Amino acid sequence: MSRVVFFGSPLDATAALHAIAAAGHEIAAVYTRPDRPAGRSGDPVPTPVKTAALEMGLQVATPDSLHHPGEQSALMSLGADAFLVVAYGRLLPAEVLEIPALGVLNVHPSLLPLYRGASPVAAAILDGAEETGVTVMLLDEGMDTGPVLAQSAPVPIREGDTRDRLTTRLFELGAGLLVDTLGGIERGSITATPQDEARATTTRLLKRSDGEIDWTKPAEQIERQVRAYDSWPGTFTSWGSRNLKIIAARAVPEGVGEPELAPGRVKVAGESLFIGTGSGRIEAERVQLEGRKAVSAAEFLRGQSSIAGASLGG
């Protein structure tokens, strides 16, 4: 069994932390992002990985940066055979990558070289990809460019999958794959394979503005946008001077004999809220008006029936 240092931050990374411990590996320390203010109180809140690690009785470090020589010396002093990185949230400097003898293993939620970068799950959904998967790779100084150690079988992207839901499923799969890969490295049965640069695609860090809906796009594309940007940056439009979030939606074809809805035009039918697009229409199933809580379309319409016939967006 190996002595490892685990790097991770969000809730989805805790599956791998628990799996590594359950497999009998010695976790010398857990590195995670510093506590951040949250909620109305602004009180500092620990990452889910920090909370889990403390509950497991593990040593936790939350440095602001790993570029400082003192932090690198502290990592070296832990005597770890391998570093394991699962959604840590920041790049490791070259000096850190060189420390462990077995290398730095990273769980990435795509089948590399496809969807490198910061938003692989969102990009796969937005592209309408039918499948994705998980890769365990050796980190190098590039952005997800290191050699591949292991990959999962393709994972179907299900109808209605949101980014959050699919991300959780991928990291649960990745937890077991990471354990198996570390064991294979210990036995010398795994060989790192360079990525095929000719097939590489890259994703970028999402911005809040990415969530604004362009109603001239086809309904299917807008539905994928809603699912891909759950829960950040979310998808939104404007209704007059107010912001309206579209939290859940589905694309529906124009009804036979029905007049086509102009992009952004709202039609109310009973408890259903339809919005015209460049092709087809969207049925908004869950929405949130600025300053209000998120509700179903039916509940929203009981208090905001005047939206019927409105034009959304700029």
Image (spheres, rainbow, N blue to C red):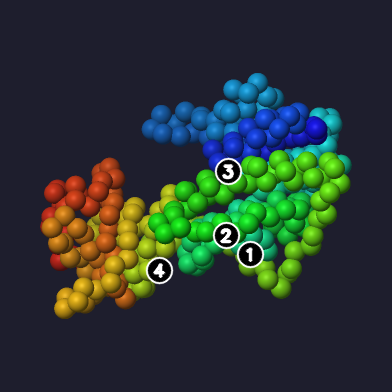
Amino acid of disc 4: Gln
Q: Which residue is drawn at 64% across and 42% down?
A: 175
Mark 2 or 4: in front is 2
Q: CA separation, marks 1 and 2?
A: 9 Å
For label 3, the residue is 172
For label 2, the residue is 132
Residue 205 sits above or below residue 302 on the image:
below
Amino acid of disc 1: Leu
Query: Disc number at residue 114?
Result: 1
Amino acid of disc 2: Thr
Asked if the residue at tag 2 contacts the one at tag 1, i.e. Cβ–Cβ closer than 8 Å, the answer is yes
Splitting the image into 4 quarters, where does residue 313 fall? bottom left
- Viewer-proximal residue among 32 and 163: 163
Q: Which residue is drawn at 44% across and 31% down?
A: 42
Judged left or right of residue 6, residue 279 is left
Splitting the image into 4 quarters, where does residue 217 fall? bottom left
Mark 3 or 1: in front is 3
Upstream in sequence: badge 2 or badge 4: 2
Mark 1 or 2: in front is 2
Q: Which residue is drawn at 63% across and 64% down?
A: 114
Judged left or right of residue 57, residue 69 is right
Q: CA separation, marks 4 and 1?
A: 20 Å
Upstream in sequence: badge 4 or badge 1: 1
Instruction: For label 4, count other residues whose C-alpha is less than 10 Å away and answer few (under 14), some (14-19) or many (20+).
Output: some
Q: How many labels does the image show?
A: 4
